Image (cartoon, rainbow, N blue to C red):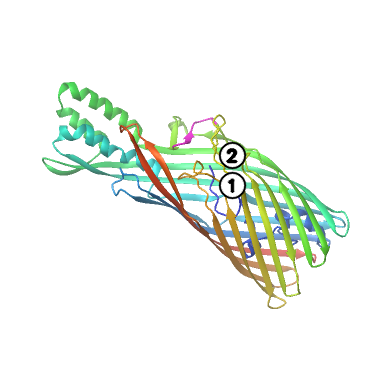
Amino acid sequence: MYINIFAGGLVTNTNQSAMFTRFQCRDATIDIDAAYYNPAGLVHFSDGFFLSVNNMAIGETWLIESDYENYTDKSKEFNGKVLTPLYPSLYTVYKRGKFAFSGSANIVSGSGEISYNNGLSPLERQVADLVPYYQSNLDTLINGSITGYEVNAEFSLKSFFPSIQFNMAYQINDYWSAAAGLRLVRAKHTYQGSINNITIKGTNLEGSFEKDPVEFIRSVADDAPVNVSGDLYEIADNLEQRITREVDAVQLGYGLTPVLSVNYAPTLYTNWAIKYEFRTNLKLTTDIPNHLKNIVTVDNDTILIDGSQIVADIPAMLSIGLTRRPSNKFMYYAGVHYYFDKPVDFDGSTTLSIDMIEKNSYEIAFGAEYRLSSAIRISAGWLMSRPGVNKQYQKETRYSLPSNSFGTGLGIRFSDLIDLNLGLSYTMYKKDEVQYVRTSEMIVGSTEVTEYYDKRTMIFSVGVDFLFGEN
């Protein structure tokens, strides 16, 4: 289970600096954020120490529309909100002779907390199924009809994968350099949610009513014939255990990612870079509080069991980039990212094997900068992302959509020691439609459901670079 709102693959965040936000492409950079994007390129710094501090403020909306026929309104929207004001990253570089040592601290996957204040469709469907169930079993006993329901449902999923990475780069000759690094990843998912304040609406000989569904069945049982009342009391007891639900769980694990990169600089104005991040093997252990040690089901295939493990591997990634400066005032970046998704088991289960990936994901990026003066630079960039998932991957708590991201921003040099970067980006997604068959324990038969998934993302970032040396 992941929430990923940045540029990147299915679970990989590549928006890791203010300069990425304003360029949308950093694969062959030789600025300070190369500690993440291109460690081998850091050998082109002058000797000294360099530091970069960045933060991103993230706002996103997840849009889900479902036509499940048992909803009161027959069609319902569920909107998830992400508001993350603090999403930091830190980069350090120390260059001496032919060696460059660098480190970074950033969040390589996950993007904060997504909150559904009006509930989530898998949770509400359980309540919506009460209406046809009551209609088929109770209408004749109450001399009336069940017409609808009300429910208060909330759900949130927080996903953060912070990491620390260390690299060492070596300058082979004037043109070639190479680097090796290792990243430690701490992976954590937090689930919280509840369904409560459930009421059933209907009419009978006394008029309209709105009652607790469990107490309503018991009241019907009190007046029902003896041969029926026993079954109704049993139904009420079972229902009481099922429809009021609390979700509270944490999944935690650690993994290592080896990183290799090579940089080729044929001239002072051209730079090529290639980086390969190995697959990060992650197994997360589920912890559920004592009062909820029973099995908790969030949706059709997200089952939380205390003490169980899930697979949450981060796919290997290959990036190739070009930086080119045709003149003193103009510079552009180009890059391609390729994610090896197919070998990864995205269903999370250690026993099941669900085919969710049709092909590997990829991205194409381009950015450019123009120097207005010795102190001010303006930039813009575009990134196209194309995931390779199939319909099996898409569900309410996790979906991936083709997107186009556009970024712009400013670079301001305050002095020889301090450089400021400001970036703003907006991502537009292509809506996806998913159809599936819903089978409920309460209702005889199955129902075809169509859901539509969409997103909108905006990011504002700021970064300050301290240049205790001059590149």
Above or below: residue 447 compared with residue 170: above
Q: Answer with the quarter of the image where residue 351 lies.
A: top right
Task: Report the residue that reaches farthest toward the top.
Answer: 227
> Does residue 360 appear to the left or right of 158 in the view shown?
right
Label count reads 2
Residue closer to the observer: 448 or 144: 448
Please indicate, yes or no, whether residue 412 appears anywhere in the rendered image.
no
Marks 2 and 1 close (CB-CB < 8 Å)? yes
Give the dominant element type of the magenta stretch: helix, strand or loop. Answer: loop
Quadrant of residue 138 within the rendered picture: top left
- Residue 312: give its label: 2
The residue indicated by pointer 1 is 11
Name the amino acid, label 1: Val
Q: Is residue 223 visible?
A: yes
Q: What's drawn in magenta, residue-wise?
A: 300-308
Where's the C terminus, which quadrant? bottom right
Q: Where is residue 345 in the image (x, y as percent from the top left)?
A: 59, 37
The picture places residue 218, in percent across and down from the top left corner, at: 22, 30
Q: Does the magenta stretch include residue 304?
A: yes
Is 366 magenta? The answer is no
Q: Nearer the viewer, residue 466 or 38?
A: 38
Sort mark 1 into few (<14), some (14-19) or many (20+) by Cα contacts within 10 Å.
many
* Viewer-closest of 324 and 215: 324
* Left or right relative to 10: residue 336: right
Residue closer to the observer: 315 or 245: 315
Say what amino acid the circle numbered 2 marks.
Answer: Ala
- Of mark 2 and mark 1, the one earlier in the sequence is 1
Q: Residues within 10 Å of mark 2 (few under 14, many from 20)?
A: many
Note whether 84 is above or below 234 in the view shown. Answer: below
Residue drawn at 40 percent across, 41 percent down: 122
